[in-house]
């Protein structure tokens, strides 16, 4: 039962209610709420946790621990998003859900949005300085239009990822590689390291796109290449490799905490 | 012969020809039963979903061949017309062509007639379908029409069957096949026999009790209905307990095949309901996940073969039953070949239903093999669980509805293969009319964790001859031709031609959008054409 601890934040949210209301809930609704939470938890694990994280904190999909969800301003819209998906994004419709299950998931996701924000592990102001100096993050990331586009753009990353994910991305980037979810192709590594050898030379970089016949890649200088697979001498995919260095050996623990905190403030 | 006969009639009655137009569209859009019988040898037309009653999806044309396929060009394209019905953006139709006119469906249930020479619109018809129509367990799609005499037949998402006038698209008759509010729906291309239109239903994910129907082609009157899940007392009812049969599934959602000599109609069936919780329906659950041979006159079952008894992975047997004649183990046999969603390729004797052979054609982890009676030797602990269990293939199967192809000249069977595992979950399920009745689900190991391929198998042994790897598991079928080619396509949008002898890629074209349908072929003015739909666009290609 690896996901059982998911109940913990829900209980915390109940405790955070005003005392009178909390008493009323204990007398009247707690068994019902607990049942709904249990059912919602199970449904969330099956249908949502893979992308949105075990605690709804985000992963391949955005964090759901937000009172306002961009595509779901109200419960009806959230129900539609859950059952029909969001066209043009990686969010699929969960057609397997019964209406009752869909409503239970709506309730569960709304509960996630009422949870308090994660505490920041450090000082975001100091983290911004780390971002721009010791970390030199803009040499590979574009944030608010500034920087180089080698790695992923970081606008809004604090709304998409939790602190644990951000920390791993800073210290062990090969573990947390951004994915792109294609409606027809499934989950693809968005920054997959590839090594391509043709008669014209050896090329290393990140896959931009691929099909059965061709592959497109971008090297660390930002140059884009397109290859016919039939012309290649070799084509290797390095799953688990990232061009981003692990900053655990470069930054102090305090600096890491600070830059994670800064990234957590990037919510727009 | 057909073409000449029609042209004679046209000369007699068409003023268009009288004024000297060299390229006329047929004014007599009749497609007779005899035309259907001759369809496999007739490369000019493509009269039914699978290109003939034997469902070979094989073009006998060779003008486009291994030597010149790299010269293929788009001759014309047709952009499909949005209906305003939400969720109807996938196109899974196979166009048919009769005497210069192409008929295709557009999601969810519209029909379009085009001049096959130019792509110009002749007529377009859309039924009045509510946006609230139920489609539980499948997208809002349609796979094509049937042609017979002067009519075009289309089955609709809200479970109706229409006969349209082939020249104008005007409605000749319509009939309500089943109740959509219970989850019944029709997405398949009907099959036209001699005076009859055969249709099956979708809906097992809503817990329907499915059936196969035959309708009088000229009046729309129902001639027979045979349920695929028996009621108590009928043969096969011993494989159900209590009232489980009432919600037993067994959908008939993909077009079948027909052997006019044996006068047997072959139709495949889908999963038992609920899909993933087998505790709620103990037993083999006949006649789900099976192929059934029907008497087309009466609808009586002559024989059946169940590929996956007591299925708990949603491995419908709704794949195309391919009718093959040839020598099997030294004896001339009438065979039925099917590459099943459960990752095994099967050969049956189609006169008797006798099991002859099963061969694993795709990686799987659920069965040690198939025993001498055709029954899988199931590996323990591969059923869905509350916690989840990892099994290959995924619920979408090692292949799915998209068509295989058979080249009778080389006895090669080609199939588009999905190579993906999934974590299967079991959940509670309670039947409520018109609601999902599923009992679980899956988390698929998709994207970079999965691949796909086009496979060539020896039809008599199921042994793989070659494979052409695809980046992701395909949702589109294949068509072989006399030109030594196999046409296929990919999620990435490529329409491509492989050398049928080796699997080597000879040509590819990026349609610019995902492809989720089958290739087909025809000729116009003796010029060979191949057609495919990418996204919302139909492309017709040929040599200049």
Image (tube, coloured by chain):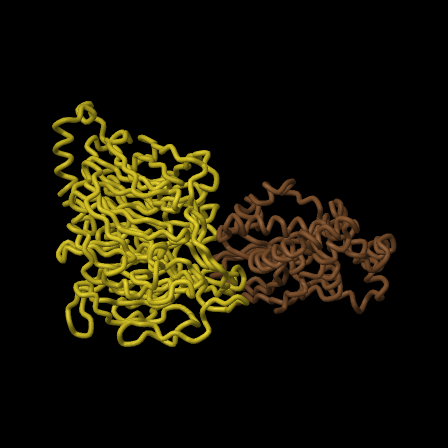
Marks counted in the figure total 0
Image spot of residue B207 (x, y percent): 39, 53
In the figure, B459 relative to A99: above or below? Answer: below
Quarter of image, res B469: bottom left
Q: Residue at x 25, y 36 (%)?
A: B163
Q: Does residue B185 appear anywhere in the picture?
A: yes
Does residue A30 appear to the left or right of B543 in the view shown? right
Q: Is residue A136 visible?
A: no
Q: Residue B236 location, x and y as percent?
A: 26, 63
Q: Is residue B231 left or right of residue A44?
A: left
Which residue is drawn at the image coordinates 47% and 46% (left, top)? Answer: B513
The residue positioned farthest toward the front in the image shown: A27
Taking A107 as reference, is A195 above or below it? below
Q: Nearer the viewer, residue B94 or B202?
A: B202
Chain B's shade in the image? yellow
| B80 or B58, nearer to the observer | B80
Pick the quarter of the image with the N terminus of chain B: top left
Name the one closer to the observer, B261 or B38. Answer: B261
**How far across and how far down the image is residue A258, in percent?**
84, 58
B164, B490: nearer the viewer: B164
Q: Where does the C terminus of chain B fall, quadrant-wise? A: top left
Q: Residue at x 25, y 33 (%)?
A: B173
Q: Quadrant of residue A30?
A: bottom right
Compared across the picture, whether B20 is left or right of A164 comes to left
Residue B184 is left or right of residue B235, and the answer is right
Q: Give how far across and how far down residue B95 sits, in percent.
A: 32, 43
* The chain coloured brown in the image: A
């Amino acid at each position: 039962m690896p996901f059982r601890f998911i109940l913990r934040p829900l209980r915390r949210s109940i405790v955070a209610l005003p005392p009178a209301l909390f008493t009323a809930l204990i007398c009247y609704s707690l068994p019902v709420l607990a049942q709904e939470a249990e059912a919602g938890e199970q449904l969330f694990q099956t249908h949502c946790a893979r992308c949105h994280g075990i605690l709804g904190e985000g992963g391949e999909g955005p964090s759901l621990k937000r009172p306002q969800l961009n595509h779901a301003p109200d419960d009806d819209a959230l129900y539609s998003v859950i059952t029909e998906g969001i066209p043009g994004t990686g969010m699929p419709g969960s057609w397997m859900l019964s209406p009752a299950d869909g409503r239970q998931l709506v309730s569960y996701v709304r509960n996630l949005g009422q949870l308090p924000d994660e505490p920041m592990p450090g000082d975001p102001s100091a983290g911004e300085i780390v971002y721009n100096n010791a970390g030199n993050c803009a040499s590979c990331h574009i944030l608010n239009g500034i920087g180089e586009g080698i790695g992923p753009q970081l606008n809004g990353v604090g709304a998409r990822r939790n602190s644990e994910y951000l920390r791993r991305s800073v210290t062990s980037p090969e573990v947390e590689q951004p994915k792109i979810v294609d409606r027809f192709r499934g989950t693809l590594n968005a920054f997959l390291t590839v090594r391509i050898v043709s008669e014209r030379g050896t090329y290393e970089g990140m896959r931009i796109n691929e099909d059965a016949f061709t592959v497109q890649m971008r090297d660390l200088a930002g140059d884009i290449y397109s290859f016919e697979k039939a012309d290649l001498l070799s084509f290797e995919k390095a799953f688990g490799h990232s061009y981003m260095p692990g900053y655990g050996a470069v930054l102090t623990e305090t600096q890491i905490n600070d830059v994670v905190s800064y990234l957590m403030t990037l919510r727009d | 012969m057909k073409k000449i006969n029609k042209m004679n009639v046209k000369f007699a009655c068409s003023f268009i020809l009288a004024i000297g137009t060299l390229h006329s569209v047929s004014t007599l859009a009749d497609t007779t039963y005899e035309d259907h019988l001759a369809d496999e040898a007739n490369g000019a037309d493509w009269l039914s979903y699978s290109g003939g009653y034997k469902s070979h999806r094989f073009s006998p044309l060779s003008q486009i061949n291994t030597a010149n396929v790299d010269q293929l060009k788009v001759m014309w394209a047709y952009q499909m017309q949005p209906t305003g019905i939400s969720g109807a953006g996938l196109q899974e139709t196979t166009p048919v062509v009769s005497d210069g006119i192409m008929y295709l469906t557009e999601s969810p249930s519209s029909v379009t007639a085009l001049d096959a020479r130019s792509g110009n619109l002749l007529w377009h018809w859309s039924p009045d379908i509510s946006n609230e129509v139920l489609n539980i367990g499948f997208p809002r799609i349609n796979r094509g029409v049937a042609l017979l005499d002067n009519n075009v037949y289309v089955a609709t998402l809200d479970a109706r069957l229409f006969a349209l006038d082939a020249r104008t698209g005007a409605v000749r008759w319509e009939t309500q096949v089943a109740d959509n509010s219970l989850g019944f729906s029709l997405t398949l291309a009907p099959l036209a026999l001699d005076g009859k239109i055969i249709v099956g239903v979708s809906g097992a994910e809503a817990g329907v009790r499915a059936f196969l129907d035959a309708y009088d082609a000229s009046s729309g009157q129902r001639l027979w209905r045979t349920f695929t899940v028996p009621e108590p007392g009928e043969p096969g009812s011993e494989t159900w307990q209590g009232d489980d049969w009432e919600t037993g599934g067994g959908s008939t959602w993909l077009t079948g095949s027909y052997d006019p000599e044996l006068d047997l109609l072959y139709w495949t069936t889908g999963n038992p309901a609920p899909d993933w919780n087998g505790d709620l329906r103990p037993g083999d659950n006949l006649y789900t996940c099976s192929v059934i041979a029907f008497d087309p006159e009466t609808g009586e079952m002559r024989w059946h073969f169940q590929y996956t008894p007591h299925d708990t992975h949603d491995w419908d047997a709704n794949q195309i039953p391919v009718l093959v004649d040839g020598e099997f183990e030294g004896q001339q046999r009438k065979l039925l070949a099917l590459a099943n969603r459960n990752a095994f390729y099967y050969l049956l004797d189609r006169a008797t239903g006798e099991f002859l052979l099963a061969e694993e054609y795709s990686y799987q982890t659920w069965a040690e093999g198939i025993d001498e009676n055709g029954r899988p030797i199931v590996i323990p602990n591969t059923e869905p669980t509350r916690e989840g269990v990892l099994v290959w293939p995924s619920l979408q199967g090692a292949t799915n509805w998209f068509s295989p192809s058979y080249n009778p000249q080389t006895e090669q069977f080609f199939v588009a293969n999905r190579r993906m595992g999934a974590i299967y979950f079991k959940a509670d399920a309670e039947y409520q009319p018109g609601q999902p009745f599923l009992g679980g689900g899956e988390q698929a190991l998709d994207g970079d964790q999965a691949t796909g391929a086009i496979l060539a198998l020896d039809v008599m042994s199921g042994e793989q001859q070659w494979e052409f790897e695809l980046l992701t598991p395909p949702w589109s079928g294949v068509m072989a031709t006399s030109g030594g080619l196999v046409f296929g396509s990919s999620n990435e949008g490529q329409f491509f031609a492989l050398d049928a002898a080796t699997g080597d890629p000879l040509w590819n074209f990026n349609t610019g959008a995902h492809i989720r349908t089958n290739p087909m072929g025809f000729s116009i003015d003796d010029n060979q054409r191949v057609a495919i739909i990418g996204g919302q666009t139909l492309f017709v290609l040929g040599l200049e």
